[in-house]
Image (cartoon, grey):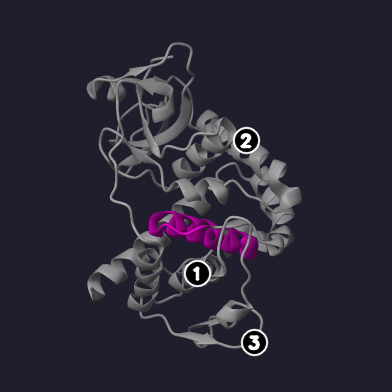
Amino acid sequence: MNSEDLSTTATDVHRAITEKIVQAIKAGAGSFEMPWHRAANIGRPVNAHTRAVYRGINVLALWVQAMARGYLSAYWGTYRQWQKLGAQVDRGEKGTVIVFYKQIEPGSDAEGDGQEGPRTRLFARASWVFNAEQISGWEPPQPEPKARIETLAEVETFIQRTDALVRHGGDAAYYDRRHDLVVMPPRGLFKARPTSSALDSYYAVLLHELTHWSGAPHRLAREFGDRFGDHAYAMEELVAELGSAFLCADLGISNEPRPDHAAYVASWLDVLRQDQKALFTAASRASAAADYLARLVRKSA
């Protein structure tokens, strides 16, 4: 398959991607392993041609495919993009569908209604991409090896430079919205997991709570009440889970499943059944949260 785009409706794009991710969530529910856990250890997916990181729902779509196919490379590209790099997609390989949004000017009939809108709209289109392990004739860039202690120091610096108020005590992690502070159990209460250290577990949870912190009214003002009603809390938890996964991938630390995820899986699946765009919304808000925290860090550097 070498076509760049699918001739399909926005609804088809949302349905196809949501269904694949929902299947992955169901498959991992018994072990609390969501599609954003171990795949995040590969790092955030990167476009091999533009070197831009993928965002939002496309991160999940590509992580799900990487888990299903056993890909260890974070690099992806369309058929034409690989050709521009002098590479060739191997015979018989199938692409992975992602979504991109094209701006439609007022009066355009791209959506088939021919009606003039009051402003520019975004129209969802689908594209096929291939992992670096599906192509020949290209070698990925080799990053300089980084010592574990250096990685952990960078994570600690990232957290400190957000200027979030973090207090340690008790045995529960949460964001105290009233006092605008993050509460964390002492680091010594966190345990190592099969593929991560106790510090990885601590930082993954802290990044989850910092994602909640980013949604405060005087920051990103993230709200879900009107659209999602009783599921608003579950949606915010999904954003925090994805935000933590994106940041763990960016910072180079592991993001292991935790048993407390089980409390939300049923709610997540319920809301995704009712609203095909819910996962797109959560992933978009999580990307915005990760970007916001990264900007705070850059400004205070």
Query: What residue is disc 2 on?
Result: 19
Q: CA distance from mark 2 to mark 1?
A: 30 Å
Query: What residue is disc 3 on?
Result: 170
- Asked if residue 131 can be seen in this view, the reply is no
How packed mark 1 is, by other alpha carbons closer than 10 Å (few <14, some 14-19, many 20 or more), is many
How packed mark 2 is, by other alpha carbons closer than 10 Å (few <14, some 14-19, many 20 or more), is some
Residue located at (48% from left, 59% from top) = 243
Query: Which quadrant of the figure contains the N terminus?
Result: top left
Give the residues drawn in magenta, as a range: 232-254
Is residue 112 a member of the stretch shown in magenta?
A: no
Tell me the SS state at disc 3: loop
Question: Viewer-nearest of labels 3 and 2?
Answer: 3
Q: Looking at numbered disc 1 in the image, what kind of residue is underneath it?
A: Tyr
Q: Looking at numbered disc 3 in the image, what kind of residue is underneath it?
A: Gly
Q: CA distance from mark 3 to mark 2?
A: 39 Å
Residue 251: percent from left, percent from top: 39, 59
Q: Is tag 3's residue or tag 2's residue first in the polypeptide sequence?
A: 2
Query: What residue is disc 1 on?
Result: 203
Residue located at (55% from left, 34% from top) = 70
Residue 189: percent from left, percent from top: 63, 78
Q: Looking at numbered disc 2 in the image, what kind of residue is underneath it?
A: Glu
